[in-house]
Image: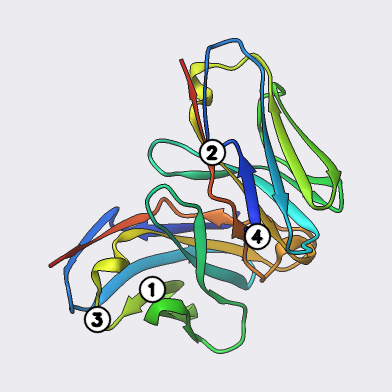
Amino acid sequence: DTAVSQTPKYLVTQMGNDKSIKCEQNLGHDTMYWYKQDSKKFLKIMFSYNNKELIINETVPNRFSPKSPDKAHLNLHINSLELGDSAVYFCASSPLGGVGYGYTFGSGTRLTVV
Amino acid sequence: AQSVTQLGSHVSVSEGALVLLRCNYSSSVPPYLFWYVQYPNQGLQLLLKYTSAATLVKGINGFEAEFKKSETSFHLTKPSAHMRDAAEYFCAVSYSGGYQKVTFGTGTKLQVIP
């Protein structure tokens, strides 16, 4: 059983398109996150939801919109894709706001914008 | 603001040699500290964490780290490197109080030479 699963694993699309990445966790965790990892492996938080409520919203273009239909799911929709959006996007989850617990990561979605 | 600095983006060791990956943190309050490992094309996996209990923390795969407040360090060590340890290692910091994001370091790529 995969604890945090993301789909798709690979996504190749053209500039200007709209795409979504889905994330599901079966750990019963309350908090979920989206991180972006660039080509230099740098990880930057984008969003965090706790029980469907947005709690962290970093400086991210408003072309990126997270949606959490329930606490087990956190999806990421990206409008008008740009070349600079190419990266690996990781979903993660943790119990109780994550403080001190550490995260469980999904295997990532490699987005390539051409 | 919290941050971590990982000294050395690449570290090479011989198989069987000591592994030492360096991490220094900056935090105005007592931190929570983490080490994660990322194997190629995979998500991050939690190796170990410090949450203000014992200063010497043991993790998975034979790794351990020691929290040294006087040096603001949390270096990761393993007595004897295995080929399977070759991966990217990330130090991360957070702190208590509400919903706190985890800030990651820039990563250290560990190469193990047979």
Give the Cα distance between marks 3 and 1.
15 Å
Determine the residue positioned at 46% across, 78% down.
B60
Q: Chain of mark 4?
A: A
Give the Cα distance between marks 2 and 1.
32 Å
Per the image, label 4 sits on a secondary structure element best described as: loop
Q: Nearer the viewer, mark 3 or mark 1?
A: 3
Q: Chain of mark 1?
A: B
Residue B2 in picture, x, y percent from top left: 58, 57
- The amino acid pointed to by label 4 is Ala
- The amino acid pointed to by label 2 is Lys
Above or below A7: residue A49: below
Per the image, label 1 sits on a secondary structure element best described as: strand
- The amino acid pointed to by label 1 is His
Determine the residue positioned at 49% across, 79% down.
B69
The residue labelled by disc 3 is B80
The residue labelled by disc 2 is A9
Q: Are marks 3 and 1 on the same chain?
A: yes
The residue labelled by disc 4 is A3
Above or below A64: residue A14: above
Q: Chain of mark 2?
A: A
Per the image, label 3 sits on a secondary structure element best described as: loop
Residue B15 in picture, x, y percent from top left: 17, 73
Determine the residue positioned at 51% across, 86% down.
B55
Q: Is residue B79 left or right of residue A97?
A: left
